[in-house]
Amino acid sequence: MSDFLFDESGLSQETIDSFRATYDELREHFNIQLTGHINFHLEDFEAFNQYHNHQLLGSYVIKNGHSDCYLLFVDTKAKKAKEGAITGHYEYQTWALAYLKRDFGRVKIRQETLKDKLAELIHPLELDFKEDKAFSDTFYVLVNDHAKAIHCMDRHFRNAVMDIREDDFVIEIVNHTLIIGNKKPISPERAVYMAEFVCKLAEVC
C-alpha cells in the first residue's frame, strides 16, 4: 500500500474507494506525508465529545512551507434509539487541523440559523463584529474570552472563513489548535477544501 493511510481490513469497498480517491486528490494538490502516531488530543474538542466513542484511523501532515497542517480521518460512534432498541451508528469523518501562532481561547464557529437569530434576541451570547456585518450575519460565534477572540479573529481570519466552500462545517479552536470538519461522508473535494483552509490560516494566523 506504499504510503497509503491505514489498514483497509474491515472496511467496505465503498469506504476504501472513498479513502483512496481522497488520498490521490490530496497528493495532486499538496505535499503530504504520513504522520505516524501523534496524539492530537481530540478529546479536548466538543465536536468529538458528543460521540459515544471516536478513534483516529490515520492522519497526513501537509507540508506547506509555513507551518505544518494536518488532515485527520476519524471513526465516530454514536448511540441511537431505534424501535425501542439502542444501536451503534458509525461514521467516517474528515477533519483538518492547524496549530496557530495566536491564543484564541475557546472558539466555536458554525453557520448561523434562524433559530440562532431568534435565540439571540432573548439571550445574546454570540460574539458579533459590528465592522463586519457580512461575517456576523453568516456565522454563529461562541467564545469564552471575548478579548482574545476579538484580537485574534481579525480581517484575515474572517475572510478565510468566509471563503470556505462547504456547508454545515464546524470550526473549533482550543487555544492554539484549530479543527474544521463536518458530518458529511468523506470525499476528495471536501478534504481539499479543508486542507486549503488550514494552510491559509497557517500563513496569516
Image: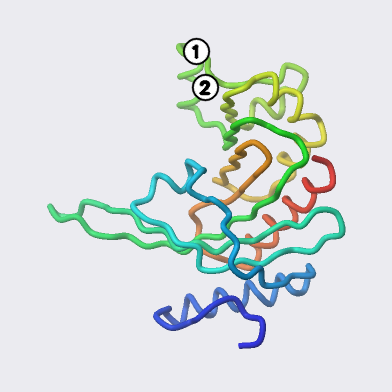
Residue beneath disc 1? 121
The residue that appears at 72% across and 56% down in the rendered structure is 69
Q: Is residue 21 above or below residue 148?
A: below
Numbered-mark total: 2
Expressed as whole percent of the image width and height from the top left, the position of residue 175 reads 64, 36
Dividing the image into 4 quarters, which one contains the N terminus?
A: bottom right
Residue beneath disc 2? 117
Expressed as whole percent of the image width and height from the top left, the position of residue 36 reads 62, 70
Quick check: marks 2 and 1 in contact, CB under 8 Å? yes
In this orientation, which residue lies closer to the viewer: 153 or 123? 153
Which residue in the rendered view is the most extreme toward the right? 65
Q: Is residue 21 left or right of residue 152?
A: left
In this orientation, which residue lies closer to the viewer: 167 or 98? 98
Q: Is residue 187 left or right of residue 10?
A: right
In this orientation, which residue lies closer to the viewer: 188 or 144? 144
Q: Amino acid at mark 2?
A: Lys
Q: Which mark is residue 82?
A: none
Residue 107 image-quadrant placement: top right
